[in-house]
Amino acid sequence: MATLMPTRITAITQEPLDHESLAVALRPWRRRLSTQQVVYWTARGIVLGLILACLVLLIARFVPWLTAPYWAASIGVACAVVALGAALWLRPSITSTAHSVDRLLALHDRMGTAWELREQSAVLARLQRRDALKHLKKYTPAATISLRLRRSTLVTFAVLALAAVLLTILPNPMDAVAKQQAAFQGQIAQQVKNIDNARQVLAHQPNIPAAEKQKIDQILKDLETKLQQAKNETEAQQAIAQAQSQLAQLQNPDATSQMQGQAAAASSLQNSTNPGLQSVGNALSNNDSKSLAQSLQDLASKVSSMSAAQRSQLAQQLEKAAQQAAGQNAKLSAALHQLAKAVADGSASEIADATNAVEAAQAQDAANASQNDSINQASNSLQQSANSLASSTDNSVTKIVQGQGQGQGQGQGQGQNQGQNQGQGQGQGQGQGQGQGQGQGQGQGQGQGQGKGQGQGKGGQGSGGQGGGNGANNSQGKNEQVYVSGQKSSGTSTQSGDNSSSVQSGNSVPYSQVIQQYNQAAHDAVDNSNIPPDEKDIVHNYFDSLAGQ
Amino acid sequence: MANNSESTSSGVNTPIEDSLLQEGYGDLDPSGYDDVHPYVDSRVQDTGTAAPAAQTESASSPVAAPSEGPSETDITRFMETTQKLEQELCSIVVGQERVIRELLLALLAGGHVLLEGVPGLGKTLLVRTLADALKLKFARIQFTPDLMPADIVGTTMVSEQSDGSSSGSKRIFSFQPGPIFANIVLADEVNRATPKTQSALLEGMQERTVSVGDRTRPLPRPFFVLATQNPLEMEGTYPLPEAQLDRFLLKIMVNFPKAEDLLRIIDTTVGTQSLRARQIASGDELQELIDIARAVPVATHIKEYAVRLLLATHPDQEDAPEKVRQYVRYGGSPRGLQALIMTSKVRALLEGRYNVSAEDVRAVAFPALRHRIMLNFDGLADGITPEHLIETIIADVETA
């Protein structure tokens, strides 16, 4: 069908034609199309944002994600803003407007061609422009281009908005898990910091050999890495237990007996009537190398002026002290024996050699004790970390099998006596150790003191020992390392007058022994309770299975 | 006037040649022929209505300046003439409106047409009516297996010519033009001739010249070849090669008329009246209409759309539809693209528009591309038609 009859062509082409009129005619259409684009794109952006927000909130219902609501809101807003920005940035040009108008009004590419050939002055081009404008004027942008959103878009928007609101306000069971995980991560970070502090303290310990210091530091460093990589409390506890085990292997097992032997020898010397030997005994008791050297030097100088009988008596006392230390500290015992023999002989050179041997033995004992103290401090720090983790995740869903632990601890405390007026007081303390924890017990020592005379004594406080017990549990055919939480264990606390605050670790108890006791306790508890028989059987079977592994 | 510098071996123009030159072939290409003679083979039927292509009435028609393109009057005349021509053809050839429209598209685009349809659908009548309406020289060649190329393009013969002044005569070589030297040539059942004879049309269709011996002679303008072929009786035929098919601007399928059209055919053909078409325009006017149609502007995005359509017919193109990759051996040539654009321009003017739209391109895609898409074995075996593939391509290729 002809849109322009030939008889009208002449009339049309006689009118002046300015190509600017094309731009003027297309501008309202361009504005309308831009507005429509902004409305539609923004609506789509909002819908897309709601879809993504719902998706995020839905994922947060299956995966612990504390910040999911914030992410959902951010994504929703971002999508809307991006869509709005894109709509504003990519506004249709005049050329695209012409093509859009052609499509919308079925103008058969009249406007697109007219705009492209707007600079041409040929008659046919002028006719074409006039024809395009004539057809365009039949329509108005407002009536042609609607700004109303489709019903489907509105329905989708409403449904998505409702879903997003419901997903936001309805309680999410994963929130508790997420909070627990966050707390766990916080605890891990705190424990890593504590371990780091322990490493710093260890680095400044002067009495520990560099090689041993490096080994301990490497263990702690590895533990930090493992803790940071731990996904749950079980892994963290395993890492701590492994580190504690490694630290325990570094300890000198004879250090305690050596110190006890030294203490026995010191006690024997302190009870001597010879002031020189008393001084030596005090130095040994205080583990003071300088005092010991000075005392031995004084003793050696006095020996030269002693009679044979006096030297013999002195040698006997030294021999007695050597015998006191013989069972527990062979090196010190040998040195004291050598000194006794040298004193009896009266040989100055032998006495000098013997005094050097005594000093060396004492120095070696002191170094071992210092190393053990450092290891114990680090081990205590790790135990505190483990306890903190355990206490912070009491509600954890991880499988924890409770068991019995036995701990033996020795508490050492300091007693401070304060005297008033002119009196002197002495305090005596008694301590009790209590072990608690998973496999390793903690003890606290408490002392009470009574003063005689006009003084008042106050007992010292001793920290409890450690008790430990590791147990293994087989569950459903898999070998799984589990930790057996310890029960309270009793420990003895001894008050000492020295400044040492070291805590002796408890002995390890075999798993079979622990689980046997724990099994018996569980059986007794269940049998004495009002539990249905079938449920009792379940508990019995469970602990029987543990005991059989 | 024609350039007469070239002459026969005698170097003298015959009276017949002079008369032909006076009748209008002088507007043809200057390098044209001068040895022309009416020749009617026993197998060639001349309508006898041939008229000089150039008439005095068309000489007075305004011709637009090349820089400005067609004038307003030209455009007005184009629309009026084409409207009348279409109406006249539709009044004579009943029930073939689509064929008439597509024939006009090819005619006004200056291209040749391949008509395919069963016998008796009015193909010859359509071409004859077209020649009558345009008052063009019309020649019909019935292609048979024994038709020789010389029967189409003509040959050089020895003839006696008396000098008039003396009693003796002299023998001279003169060129006897074949039936191809007409404005409208109907090559009936073109696929029945041998490829050698079919190829005789090649040069004429593409170059609009004919080479005989050592001479190249221009064909009259306008020059249209309308070939027909019967899709049913393929026994003993020589299907046109792709190169020759590509020379046809459009391939028009002539379908069987509907019942109401058959009733009208009875009323118009079996009665006592004998319908002949009125003259609507002359050859020169037709040439002007062709020039006007070529001036129709085409926007870039329409050209790009046509290019995408054509490229989509090639199976090795990434954007080609899956069916094209599966069933097509060769796609359309650049001539197909020219056909798309030229016929789209004509269609736009016929639709009363001054610009080509994508709808025009889609409308002419079927006749312009159906003979340029060569199916592979799978396509032939599965009964796929080029029309089906063109539909797929149109649906697949986006406008912009």
Image (spheres, coloured by chain):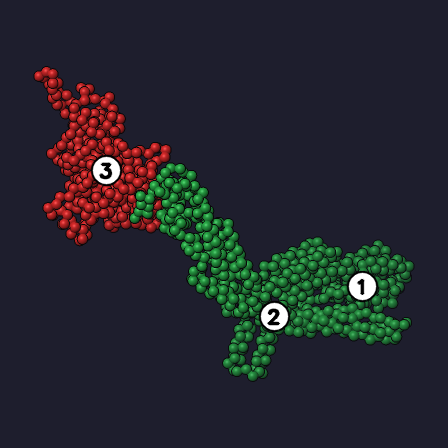
Q: Categorize mark 2 by other alpha carbons within 10 Å: few (<14), some (14-19), many (20+).
A: few
Circle 1 residue: A286
Residue A467 position within the rendered picture, expressed as x and y whole percent measured from the top left: 67, 69
* Tag 3 and tag 1 share a subunit: no
Please name the amino acid that badge 2 sits on.
Asp
Given residues B181 and A517, the one toward you in this image is B181
Residue B235 position within the rendered picture, expressed as x and y whole percent measured from the top left: 15, 43
Given residues A300 and A5, the one toward you in this image is A5
Chain B on-screen colour: red
Please name the amino acid that badge 1 sits on.
Asn
Distance Cα–Cα, label 2 vs label 3: 104 Å
**Left or right side of B347 for A399:** right
* Tag 2 and tag 3 share a subunit: no
Mark in front: 3 vs 1: 3
Circle 3 residue: B281
Q: Which chain letter matches label 3? A: B
Q: Quadrant where the C terminus of chain A lies?
A: bottom right
Q: What element carries label 1?
A: helix
Residue at the extreme left of the image, as rendered: B167
Chain A on-screen colour: green
Residue A172 higher or lower than A533, as above or below: above
Given residues A48 and A268, the one toward you in this image is A48
